[in-house]
Amino acid sequence: MRPQRQFSPSLIRALEVLVAVAEAGQMRAGARLLGLTQPSASQHIANLEAAYGVTLFDRSMRPTRLTPAGRLLHRQAVKILNSLSDMEAAMRHVGPHPIGMLRVGLQASVATTLTPGLVAMARGAFGVTDVTLHAGQSGDHERLLRTKQADLALTSNPFYDLDGLERHDVLRERFLLVLPPDHEGPDHSLEAIQADLPLVRFADSTHVGRQTMQHLRRLRFAPSRMIEVDRSSMVTACVTEGMGFSLLTPTLLIDGLVEHMRLRILPLPVAGMSRSLTVVAREGELAGLPAAFAAEAGRTLRRRIGELMGDAGLSALLDAR
């Protein structure tokens, strides 16, 4: 009789590492996605290579690329992990606690505001016993969803290119002009403001950064001086210190206003742009929880924006799409 390979937890973990590294294109990024150290992730890959006598990644390439053997194993690993995820989802609907464990990705700019209420609702209304939350940008959420490391995400990118997802609107919000508190120069146009101040903006590695620059290009405005960061609190910190101006939405202003940063907030002097926040989850796995999350998040954010910004902030919020 042919001996059967033991599918141990370590093998499953190694397959998760393989998929994460392949998606991230980098050993360090893949390890971070799974909460592992780079040496630990490298050891999992080395164990797979030793077990099957193959090389899985071409380490001479940047970003790291799968070899033909790696692509074959990657396809099989995705199938196995998807099957395990499906099994886990099905088992959640058995017994007195339908959703025992919940893994959530949260937009970094609203994570602090939303975490207590969302955790309380998951436990109280849906019987969730274990909740894990990851704060990050939409790119982080995409990797978490692709690799089945998150069950749902509240994000600024609805990921229309990913199949098998359900989407629930949270809110839509206009961008506002954000100036240093003591700015005395003209504010009637971006060009006039740029003559005095650099633009402080999100980097192109973020969804909001790409969205902002695409809109500015449509307006034929090319910033000549910029400061690029990847967190909203970093943007507001630069602006409040007089280092530049920015274009931000009410939810992107929350952390700075909570920290009592002094900012001058005005309507945009150009054709407006907006962004949406959406709860995205794998379709049909969590019953009514994603829709409830979206509704609770929308209520909490509107209340907080009203407290911090009053009518000016609430007027920048639009009805959900």
Image (cartoon, rainbow, N blue to C red):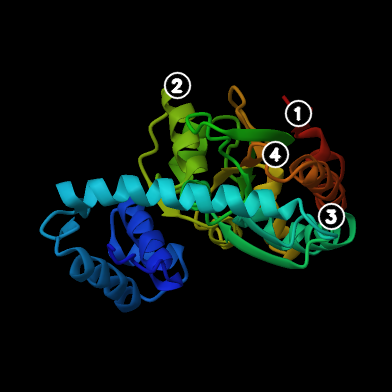
Q: Earlier in the sequence, mark 1 or mark 4?
A: 4
Left or right: 127 in relation to 2: right
Front residue of 121/111: it is 121
Measuring from the top left, give residue 262's x and y in whole percent.
Answer: 70, 60
Measuring from the top left, give residue 122's x and y in whole percent.
Answer: 81, 57
> Would you say the residues marked 2 and 1 are in contact, meaning their CB atoms lie under 8 Å apart?
no
Disc 4 to disc 3, how far (Cα)? 41 Å
- Assign a secondary structure to mark 4: strand
> Would you say the residues marked 4 and 3 are in contact, meaning their CB atoms lie under 8 Å apart?
no
- Within the image, what quadrant is residue 217 found in? top left
Closer to the camera: disc 3 or disc 2?
Answer: 3
Find disc 2 in the rendering and name its residue.
218
- Amino acid type at image mark 3: Phe
- Amino acid type at image mark 2: Arg
Residue 139 shows up from this direction: no
Q: Residue at x 82, y 41 (%)?
A: 295
Front residue of 261/2: it is 2
Front residue of 66/6: it is 6
Closer to the camera: disc 2 or disc 1?
Answer: 1
